[in-house]
Image (cartoon, helix red, strand yellow):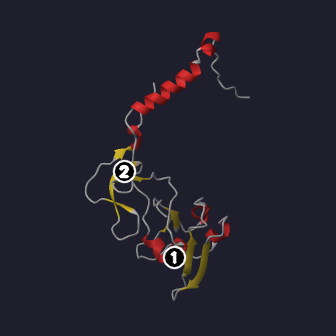
Amino acid sequence: MARTGVKRHSWIGRIFFADLLAGLRLTLGYMMSKTVTHHYPDYEKWVPYQRHRGHHFMNTNDQGEVNCVACGLCSVICPCDCITVIPFETEQGDRRPKVFDIDLARCLYCGLCEDACPADAIKLGQEYEVSTTNRATLKVHLEDLIAAPRKAEDGGLVRPARLDSEGTQRSVLRSGPSTGLDWWSRIRRHK
């Protein structure tokens, strides 16, 4: 059995509330230090790490065709039943999805669909801005999955961004060279 280390104070520490004073010192230290504020979504956007599981995307081959063979394993293994796959066969005899829909309102972003895919077609990407006021926009189709952003090569940084002017209420990274800022460098460390 694991034991937790409880710091025992003498009777003087109990009388003068040593634990309370240590907690107040920590709180006041954070109150007087520099604030850690993201200017999201207007000026900054955090780019997720590679392991982040966000909005789905579809991998394509060199000819621009989807890697999906419409086997339906992703829809079978999905615990919330949010994936719809309807297959069809092309003239060459290749099996492709006629309909591939994902209902993001029901999705748990668990990653079981990408684990079950034998063709390495569906992946979870870096996009985390999926909130909306219209439920119909949360149902994404095959074309949306092909156009969705991929994984970030260098995630974990805060980059300059701006709010999208097309009215999608999403922030987009600013173009041009930017090194980004490590968010963890802004936090005060205790020694």
Mark before the other along the chain sequence, 2 or 1: 2
- Residue 58: where, in percent of width, then height? 49, 69
Question: Relative to residue 180, is residue 144 depicted above or below?
Answer: below
Q: Is residue 15 left or right of residue 136?
A: right
Q: Please name the residue that numbered disc 1 is placed on.
A: 141
Q: Nearer the viewer, mark 2 or mark 1?
A: 2
Residue 189 visible, this orientation: no
Residue shown at 40% from the left, 31% from the top: 32
Residue shown at 54% from the left, 26% from the top: 23
Q: Residues within 10 Å of mark 2 (few under 14, many from 20)?
A: few
Q: Residues within 10 Å of mark 1 (few under 14, many from 20)?
A: some
Q: Is residue 50 left or right of residue 87?
A: left
Q: Please name the residue that numbered disc 2 is placed on.
A: 39
Callout 2: SS: loop
Tell me the CA gap for discs 2 and 1. 32 Å
Report the amino acid beneath label 2.
Answer: His
Question: Relative to residue 191, is residue 63 depicted above or below?
Answer: below
